[in-house]
Image: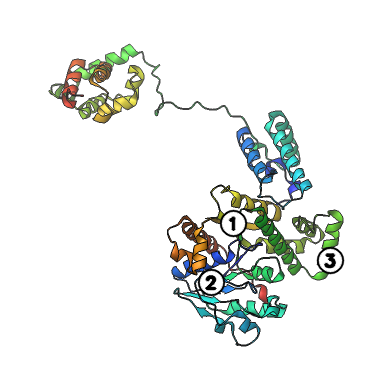
């Protein structure tokens, strides 16, 4: 450890040279707590002048680093004397948007929606398994899931296009009765789901409602 | 070699004996053969904390050569695995041990075959306290969150710091260093002993390095005793930080020990606190400190033997 007076601003504030302004502010608050007047922590450890000296030094460090322009200047000086690596410098990376959904949005710009639906329709009509499932009186979430995987349609795609929350779609497929909404809404979701997959919506709604029971 | 923990702290009444006694009980209950040594000569009352009547044997028997070995002054206690060397005595002149006597005690302590030896040091910054502090591989400072106590802790730590510098350098070097330092900065020998180290490094890099390593070798711990609800629980960590930043010494915070009115009851009843009130926050804190101390001290090497120097 270097003597206090020879430390650079980053060392004084106990931060790395690539610290963000927020980190700098926090660090300053932290060291200020250590040396402030009323703190009994530093009681008798420093003389009044010493503490004042340290506090003003810290303030100088803080003010130099919190302003981006003066910070760049200070960094340049540190780089000149070889105390700082250029790579270690702070750069304001554009913050990435916080993801709202728990999936990566998939964009289907490549094919027009109309063509996608036609393609699905064709595959539904040719698929034996789907026909077999659709002949059942009762449809469970697992059945819906089976049909969807048969068509190779990701759940995200349905959510994206129908605007039904992916959690809801998942709850339907997993037969998670507790998460399902009242029947009125559920019917709507099922309709959207079936419509997107190009399967008979009436069969899907009736079959699934029968499965969960009208009481819902 | 036994693990030697010295428990000290500048101020009287901060709970050194209380913590020593209870840590000893915890160690003994953990299956370690533990010896408590009351080095608070002149104001010894560790025996009361662990619920022993005034002992017949004491360390003064050894100092006065009434008995041949230190081992003979050991008293067994009601707690299994826990032993005590009392410091209780009536002989006034013994309070200030001569250097030879101190060395004799230290040497004998090192020879004892126990897993843990806890030294309960007296208040103040006399050489008595400091030297015992320096032979332990784990010095534990006890402070309360009050300015008076903290002030004394800092004073004690600085004394240890100076004492170490004096020990490493011969008197000629030390005088040269002190003069140089005084000339450069009036505070060097008073409030900022850390400046000494840097000046020493400039004057004589080789010795400076030895000195720095010696100072680094200290593994000090800090326990904050009598923390009341309204106190800032971070004080201990902050104190350690100040010491690490400005004195270049390792200081490890081992925990807060809550203030508890019932400590008074336990002492008055002469029953160990941990036995009388095992389910209090304070008892929990003590166990926690004990746990932290064990995990910290396991990681550190057995310290240099000052006695051989």
**Rendered view: A198 above or below B48:** above
Where is residue B67, by image quadrant? bottom right
For disc 3, the marked residue is B175
Residue occupying the point 53% across, 76% down:
B84
For disc 2, the marked residue is B48
Q: Position of residue A93 (x, y in %)?
A: 58, 29
Density class for disc 2 (Cα within 10 Å; few <14, some 14-19, many ≥20) is: many
Q: Chain of mark 1?
A: B
Q: Chain of mark 2?
A: B
Disc 2/disc 1 C-alpha distance (Å) = 29 Å
Label 3 SS: helix
Density class for disc 1 (Cα within 10 Å; few <14, some 14-19, many ≥20) is: many
- Going from the N terminus, do you reach mark 2 or mark 1 first? 2
Label 1 SS: strand
Give the label, 2 or 1, closer to the camera. 2
Which color scheme is applied?
Answer: rainbow
- Going from the N terminus, do you reach mark 3 or mark 2 first? 2
From the viewer's side, name the closer residue of B19 and B179: B19
Question: Can residue A113 be seen here?
Answer: yes
Disc 3/disc 1 C-alpha distance (Å) = 32 Å
Q: Is the C-beta separation of discs 2 and 1 under 8 Å?
A: no
Density class for disc 3 (Cα within 10 Å; few <14, some 14-19, many ≥20) is: few
């Amino acid at each position: 450890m270097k003597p206090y007076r020879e430390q650079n601003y980053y060392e004084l504030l106990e931060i790395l040279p690539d610290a963000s302004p927020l980190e700098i502010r926090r660090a300053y608050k932290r060291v200020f707590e250590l040396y402030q007047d009323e703190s009994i922590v530093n009681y008798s450890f420093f003389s009044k002048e010493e503490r004042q000296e340290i506090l003003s030094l810290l303030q100088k460090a803080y003010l130099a680093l919190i302003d981006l322009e003066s910070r760049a200047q200070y960094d340049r000086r540190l780089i000149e004397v070889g105390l700082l690596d250029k790579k270690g410098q702070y750069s304001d990376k554009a913050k990435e948007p916080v993801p709202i959904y728990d999936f990566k949005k998939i964009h289907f710009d490549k094919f027009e929606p109309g063509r996608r639906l036609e393609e699905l329709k064709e595959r539904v009509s040719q698929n034996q398994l789907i026909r077999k499932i659709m002949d059942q009186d009762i449809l469970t979430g697992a059945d819906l899931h089976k049909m969807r995987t048969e068509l190779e349609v990701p759940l995200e795609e349905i959510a994206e296009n129908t605007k039904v929350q992916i959690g809801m779609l998942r709850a339907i497929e997993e037969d998670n009765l507790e998460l399902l909404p009242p029947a009125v809404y559920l019917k709507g979701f099922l309709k959207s789901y079936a419509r997107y997959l190009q399967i008979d919506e009436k069969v899907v709604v009736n079959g699934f409602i029968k499965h969960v029971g009208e009481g819902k | 070699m036994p693990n030697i923990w010295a428990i000290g702290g500048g101020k009287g009444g901060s709970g050194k004996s209380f913590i020593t006694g209870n840590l000893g009980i915890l160690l003994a209950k953990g299956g370690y053969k533990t010896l408590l040594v009351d080095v608070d000569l002149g104001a010894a009352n560790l025996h009361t904390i662990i619920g022993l009547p005034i002992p017949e044997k004491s360390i003064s028997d050894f100092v006065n050569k009434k008995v041949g070995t230190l081992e003979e002054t050991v008293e067994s206690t009601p707690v299994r695995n826990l032993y005590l060397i009392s410091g209780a005595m009536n002989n006034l002149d013994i309070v200030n041990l001569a250097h030879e006597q101190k060395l004799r005690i230290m040497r004998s302590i090192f020879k004892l075959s126990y897993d843990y030896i806890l030294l309960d040091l007296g208040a103040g910054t006399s050489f008595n306290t400091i030297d015992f502090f320096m032979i332990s591989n784990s010095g534990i400072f006890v402070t309360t969150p009050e300015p008076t106590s903290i002030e004394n802790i800092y004073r004690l730590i600085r004394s240890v710091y100076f004492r170490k510098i004096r020990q490493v350098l011969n008197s000629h070097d030390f005088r040269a260093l002190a003069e140089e330092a005084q000339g450069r900065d009036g505070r060097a020998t008073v409030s900022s002993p850390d400046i000494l180290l840097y000046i020493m490094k400039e004057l004589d890099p080789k010795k400076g390095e030895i000195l720095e390593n010696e100072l680094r070798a200290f593994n000090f711990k800090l326990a904050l005793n009598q923390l009341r609800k309204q106190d800032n629980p971070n004080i201990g960590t902050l104190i350690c930080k100040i010491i690490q930043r400005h004195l270049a010494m390792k200081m490890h915070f081992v925990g807060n020990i809550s203030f508890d009115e019932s400590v008074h009851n336990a002492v008055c009843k002469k029953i160990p606190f941990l036995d009388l009130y095992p389910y209090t926050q304070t008892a929990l804190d003590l166990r926690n400190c004990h746990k932290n101390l064990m995990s910290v001290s396991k990681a550190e090497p057995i310290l240099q033997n000052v006695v051989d120097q």
